[in-house]
Image: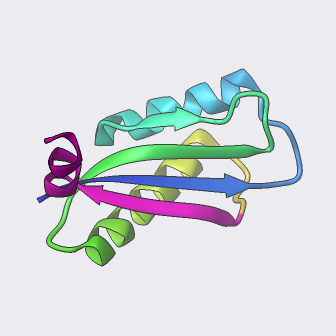
Amino acid sequence: MRWSVGIETEGDRVLSREEVVELADAVATSSGIATGIGTNRYGAQLLVQAGSRDEAIAKARQEFGRAVTTAGLPVYPVVRVEAVSEDEDSGEDG
């Protein structure tokens, strides 16, 4: 099943446009988008295949960590994680 997982971190300095663009490039391999330009938070919304919410979050956190390293961003504490399955999402719309 496909899951959309949002992860957000918070740190002690404002991120530049260039830094968030680097993160966006790094999460693009997971059909991801990045957020955080001009704030002290950065995050991403990633699509992963998983059998459960916990597995989806674990996979997304691993991919997010790889993307953060690739983008050269400071490692900030995670302040928000949420996951929505494809089934849950379609149920809300229908």
The N terminus: image quadrant: bottom left
Image coordinates of residue 13 in percent, x first then y, are: 88, 44
Of residues 19 and 51, which is closer to you in this image? 51
Q: How many numbered marks appear?
A: 0
Specify the quadrant of the image occupied by residue 23.
top right
Using the rendered image of the protein, determine whether residue 23 is visible from the camera's viewpoint.
Answer: no
| Figure check: 47 above or below 26 | below
Q: Which residues are magenta?
A: 77-94
Q: Is residue 23 above or below residue 87?
A: above
Give the residue displayed 29% in from the left and 66% down from the top. 56
Please provide percent x and percent y for residue 15: 78, 35
| Residue 84 lies within the magenta run | yes
Q: How is the image coloured?
A: rainbow
Residue extending farthest to the right is: 12
- The residue sitting at 60% across, 53% down in the picture is 8
Say whether residue 94 is left or right of residue 61: left
Residue 57 picture location, percent across and down: 37, 68
Q: Is residue 1 left or right of residue 15?
A: left
Q: Nearer the viewer, residue 37 or 62?
A: 37
- Left or right: 90 with respect to 24? left
Q: In the rendered image, which quarter is residue 82 located in?
A: bottom left
Q: Which residue is pictured at 52% across the width and 55% down the height?
A: 7
Q: Position of residue 90 (x, y in %)?
A: 15, 45
Asked whether residue 50 is drawn in magenta, I would say no
Q: The C terminus is located in which quarter?
A: top left
> Which residue is nearer to you in this view: 88 or 26?
88
Nearer to me, 82 or 59: 82
Farthest residue toward the front?
A: 94
Q: Quadrant of residue 80?
A: bottom right
In the rendered image, the vertical position of residue 2 relative to residue 50, given as above or below = above
* Residue at the spot 63% in from the left edge and 64% down from the top edge: 78
